[in-house]
């Protein structure tokens, strides 16, 4: 099957949120329990470094985007990675295509650190990020509750070698 990597467009917002909902429903990807409106989602993420992967039927099967970790000027080059795939397309090696493109794009836009927090039981995502050059910074015990259950997260980062 052929896939096309392209910049995310406003017309992708419904599909992006559908895929995000799958991540929310899994209980493995995010502390979020509700799906934001397209407008709220758009305001949460940087306008740059938004990418989608389409299948040969022009259906978005995965997306990635960056959001600020802080609005403070000193952290303008630090962003949190979000990467989600339709359940049907997970585990096919497609995530690396998206993530590598976003890393290159983030450097072009002056980001020096990308970070992500992954639930400690999400072994697939942990291995994926390690395979793609992210390193463990630490473990945050009982960082938050999801559906009444405390969750530990492992914090990862990838530092740019050129920014």
Image (spheres, rainbow, N blue to C red):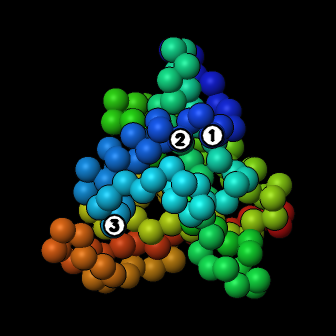
Which residue is pictured at 47% across the width and 31% down the height?
Answer: 61
Can residue 93 be spotted in the picture?
no
Please name the residue that numbered disc 3 is placed on: 31
Foreground pick, 83 / 127: 83
Q: Secondary structure at mark 1?
A: helix
At label 1, counting other C-alpha atoms closer than 10 Å, the crowd grade (few under 14, some 14-19, many 20 or more) is: few
Q: Given this view, does label 3 or label 1 mark the residue nearer the observer?
A: 1
Q: Is residue 38 left or right of residue 111?
A: left
Marker disc for residue 10:
1
Which residue is pictured at 51% across the width and 14% down the height?
Answer: 57
CB atoms of marks 2 and 1 within 8 Å: yes
Foreground pick, 84 / 42: 42
Query: Residue 35 at what x, y percent from top left?
Result: 37, 54
Q: Is residue 72 above or below residue 7?
A: below
At label 2, counting other C-alpha atoms closer than 10 Å, the crowd grade (few under 14, some 14-19, many 20 or more) is: some
Query: Residue 76 at what x, y percent from top left?
Result: 74, 75
Which residue is pictured at 54% across the width and 15% down the height?
Answer: 56
Marker disc for residue 13:
2
Measure the C-alpha gap from mark 2 to mark 3: 20 Å
Q: Is residue 108 above or below residue 6?
A: below
Quadrant assignment, res 138: bottom left
Measure the C-alpha gap from mark 3 to mark 1: 25 Å
Query: Residue 52 at what x, y percent from top left?
Result: 59, 37
Q: Secondary structure at mark 2?
A: helix
**Looking at the figure, which quarter contains the C terminus?**
bottom right
Query: Residue 22 at what x, y percent from top left?
Result: 32, 44
Which residue is pictured at 29% across the width and 61% down the height?
Answer: 33
Q: Is residue 81 above or below residue 143?
A: above
Q: Is residue 137 left or right of residue 75?
A: left
Q: Is residue 12 above or below residue 26?
A: above
Q: Upstream in the sequence, badge 2 or badge 3? A: 2
């Amino acid at each position: 099957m052929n896939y096309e990597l392209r910049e995310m467009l406003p017309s992708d917002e419904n599909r992006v949120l559908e895929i995000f909902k799958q991540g929310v429903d899994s209980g493995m990807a995010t502390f979020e329990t509700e799906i934001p409106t397209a407008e709220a989602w758009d305001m949460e993420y940087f306008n740059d470094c938004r990418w989608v992967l389409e299948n040969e039927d022009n259906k978005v099967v995965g997306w990635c985007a960056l959001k600020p970790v802080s609005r403070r000027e000193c952290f303008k080059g630090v962003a949190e990675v979000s990467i989600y795939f339709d359940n049907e397309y997970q585990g096919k090696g497609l995530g690396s295509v998206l993530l590598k493109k976003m890393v290159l794009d983030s450097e072009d836009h002056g980001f020096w650190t990308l970070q992500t927090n992954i639930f400690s039981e999400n072994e697939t995502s942990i291995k994926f990020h390690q395979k793609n050059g992210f390193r463990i910074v630490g473990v945050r015990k009982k960082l938050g509750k999801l559906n009444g259950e405390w969750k530990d997260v492992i914090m990862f980062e990838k530092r740019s070698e050129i920014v």
